[in-house]
Image (tube, rainbow, N blue to C red):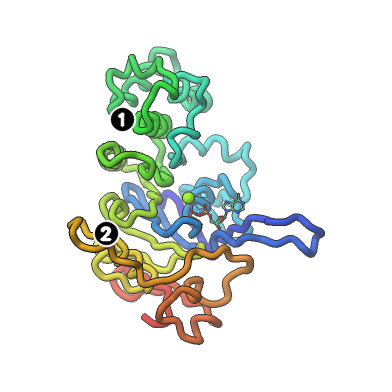
Amino acid sequence: MIVKLEDVWVRYPLSRGGLLSTTYLHAVNGVTLEFEEGKIEGVIGESGSGKSTLGRTALRLIQPYRGKVYWDGVDVTKLPERKLRKMRKDFQLIQQDPYGALDPRLSVYDIVSEGLRVHKLVSSKDEERELVLKTLASVKLTPPEAFAEKKPDELSGGQRQRVAIARALVMRPKFIVADEPVSMLDASTRGQILEILKETREKYGTSMMFITHDIAIAAYISDSISVIYGGTIVERADSDTIVRNPLHPYTAALIQAVPDPNPDKPVKEPNIKGEVEPLLDEPKGCVFYKRCPLAKDICRTERPKLREVGNGHYVACHLV
Ligand code: ADP
Ligand code: MG
């Protein structure tokens, strides 16, 4: 197991009044999830459901207030940054925004090579240059020599995202959190970036958490999918099962809302009302209770456990 999250809880302080009046936004509420070598785990859910918080917690960019995070079997939940530093090269983030993520003052070469220098992964300038150019070529920024000299503002959105991916890949990480890496890109660039990530997994056995709100993309790239709502995994299964046999009412609604590829068919409305609401307390009942078309009394009072209902198929719902 490359990364393991064990009953992880994350909250953000909203107001810092007195000691007794601090209120929190509960973003992740008891998530247990394991990431295996060479596997891509999709994490899907609407905006505000806690995906980015979960990804950043897996990378120990955020510390949970309860639960544990393991890297390669090592409990890193409370390790101070100076002890994490050596391990960080193996655990990389690719962010959504190809514009904000790159320092506009640096050249592509400097951006991609920085981690190599910081972590002393190369022993000479020549070795560094070779590795950077090779990595730029692998993300299809060719000729790499020309792209190396450019600044981010000379690049398109798709090219910037490739630079962000190259910066992560050059470290040969064991685990990558890709946080909506293609959501701001046009369709053809999107396909190319997904291919690069797939190739990386195949070539190096990299493990990934692929975050998206797009179920079609999740199904395309992931081996298995975790559906998250209210900072809670409500369903998890291999990608085919999630798409063909969704059991949780929230997953079913997400699948139903996927537009039909046939443009003449009317767009289906999801069968859930309202939107994601921030949780200001730890959830007592089902996180989806308020929006669920099937909710019963028990759903308000008792939190459903994530239990196995079929081979590797897990659902947290009282009604399944
Ligand atoms: P997603 O990536 O699925 O859109 P996020 O993890 O970004 O979800 O956010 C989950 C919840 O936490 C949301 O209600 C969001 O507003 C809140 N949140 C995220 N970051 C912060 C923060 N730094 N401070 C306070 N609340 C935050
Ligand atoms: Mg997000």
Task: Find disc 1 in the rendering and name its residue.
Answer: 139
Q: Quadrant of the C terminus?
A: bottom left
Q: Locate residue 86: give its quadrant.
A: top right
Query: Element type at marker 2?
Result: loop
- Tell me if residue 117 comes above or below residue 21 in the rendering: above
- Tell me if residue 101 comes above or below residue 116 in the rendering: below
Is 46 displayed left or right of 17 in the figure?
A: left
State how far apart marks 1 and 2 are (Cα): 30 Å
Task: Find disc 2 in the rendering and name its residue.
Answer: 259
Query: Element type at marker 1?
Result: loop
Q: Locate residue 294: give its quadrant.
A: bottom left
**Can residue 169 be seen here?**
no
Looking at the image, which is closer to me, 123 or 244? 244
Amino acid type at circle 1 is: Val
Residue 64, percent from left and from top: 60, 55
Q: Residue at x 27, y 59 (%)?
A: 259
Residue 255, percent from left and from top: 30, 64
Label 1 neighbour load within 10 Å: few <14, some 14-19, many 20+? many
Is 77 displayed left or right of 15 in the figure?
A: left
Q: Locate residue 194: give its quadrant.
A: top left
Q: Residue at x 25, y 38 (%)?
A: 188
